[in-house]
Image (cartoon, rainbow, N blue to C red):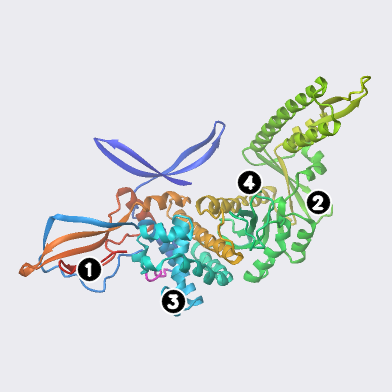
Amino acid sequence: MFLRRYERRKNGKTHTYWALVESIRTARGSRNRIVAHLGELRKSERSGWAQLARRLNKEERPQPSLFDPPVYDHPIDDEEPILVKLKGLRLERLRDFGDVWLVLGLWRLLGLDTLLSRLIPEGREEVPWAVVAAILTIARFCEPASELHIEHTWYRRTALEDLVGVSVEQVHTDRLYTGLDQLLPHKEAIEKHLNERLGDLFDLKYDLLLYDVTSTYFEGECLGNPMAQRGYSRDSRPDCPQVCIGLVVTTDGIPLGYEVFDGNTNDSKTVETIVEAMEKKYGHANRVWVMDRGMVSEKNLAFLRQRGGSYIVGTPNAMLRQFEQQLVAKDWQEVQPGVEVKLVAGPGGDETFLLARSADRREKEKAMHDRFLERMEAKLTKLQAAAKSGRLRDGDVAHQRLGRLKERYWRAASAFEVKIEVLPNPDGKARLSIRWRRNPRWGEWNALSEGCYLLRTNLNGLDPATLWKRYIQLTEAEWAFRITKDELEIRPVWHQKAERVKAHILVCFLAYVLWKALAQWMRCAGLGDAPRTLVAELAKIKSGDVVLQAQRRGGIEQTLRIRCVTTPDEAQRVLLNRLGLKIPQRLRYLEDVNQTVEKSFQM
């Protein structure tokens, strides 16, 4: 579910409000349905912060907090009258405030500021490395780009200088790169801390773990990075070297940990490493691992059984043929509209197989098969015509073309029986005969198996609906990869050194944790679980310097500069009220600057 802003004109006035919307699938395609209209928070409702505070035993918010108005070191003296020249009033130094303020608040809410300050004690550096890590992560969350972009563009445009106390001149690529190097050695400690903190905040369950693998590619040859290898690319960039990333998440999509593998590593080769890493961090437990068919091998399943682990995994499509009789039988159980399942006992009795079939998936696979059949048949007809006309005479060339066709239209490769023969010819010139026909057995099997898939588990005593729903939660891991690639832009990787690449992935991991923490917080506040709309709306809240020409008692003329935050509009106040947040009005105390010796506030 996500937020959508609506505007309506009534009695000559424009009224703005928010609605919570969800996407639903209908016979006519995807449609949006309004779940609820959001207004001001009523007394009977709890804000998102109140919900979290209850789980934290009413603990106070992290200090120093960004969620409350600032407490000034010096009291504001309002007794002395000041004459202000309105003609000289101006606004300077406009900066993005709302989004960085929110994300820095999330950083402190998760305790990452205190954790990194303890892990990386301050030394002789000008800027603490814990603060540099915060800048890197906030930049990745708000506007993912290179470290050079942070230095030259992004940091100068935001109010983060006021929030963290680091000047623009102190944020440069050398410091940011070194910050990556300082952060990487503490990966395991960070993962363990986040596991505990997120568990306290959102009451997470860790008995069911979802595991999946993706890849991210490099720009450049990466000759100095042995991990950068060519392999199966999920980004459709087989021409680029890549690394593989294995990610473990909970059923809510909250990440528990990840590992980076060489780019040519097969998915099934990563399972033992991930399981051992999770057991090292969180101890042995009878957890249930959910993985797709790319991870499945008899060796991996035996490894999990030996360690007392349970699993629900996908299986290769070829394994469906062993259950052809069960597919024909009519003892299916509907678990949701359009999805049916049934349990089948395994051959040894130690495992159970779950057959599932989906009407939507059947239509999709049938459309793909029909398209491949149509294109394959058209190409075979052209190949046959070329042989008949004499333009194609070489049998080897004909077999090469047929091989390329089968590779290109692989879904329909076994649907045709093709025979290529060299015919005798009295004039000595070779002639080819190409004949083909449909394989009837292929069509029968496809009609039966389209939309079907097979799951495998060593869990006993669970009903088929529960097993299916647990496996379907694997989509949370797939969404995690989609968010890191599309929203946080983990790809492409421009770093060339292996350690820098790992540090870049760690920063993306931290940004994703903040993303999911905000999504959970929004869910507690009844705002859905899609943060992008919220972040984009709060990014409209700016900070700036209001500069006034004033005159005090005695005719002393001064220039007054107040660093303020713009007042949220009505729609923004609704969101902040739902979350339980209050935007500060001023970032700095009223500064009195003599007109002859004006103080500089350049960032």
Discs 2/4, front: 4
**Numbered mark located on residue 133 in the image:** none
- Kind of residue sitting beneath label 2: Gly
Q: How many marks?
A: 4
- Residue named by callout 2: 346
Label 4 close to label 1 by CB (< 8 Å)? no
Q: Which residues are magenta?
A: 58-64
- Kind of residue sitting beneath label 3: Glu
Note whether residue 138 is visible: yes
Discs 2/1, front: 1
| Residue 571 coordinates in the image, percent (x, y) | 33, 48
- Kind of residue sitting beneath label 1: Lys
| Residue 596 coordinates in the image, percent (x, y) | 15, 68
- Residue named by callout 1: 599
Q: Which of the two labelled residues, at mark 4 and mark 3, occupies the earlier sequence position?
A: 3
Would residue 59 be counted in the magenta stretch? Answer: yes
Q: Which of the two labelled residues, at mark 1 and mark 3, occupies the earlier sequence position?
A: 3
Q: Which of the two labelled residues, at mark 2 and mark 4, occupies the earlier sequence position?
A: 4
Q: Main secondary structure of the magenta part?
A: loop
| Residue 97 coordinates in the image, percent (x, y) | 35, 58
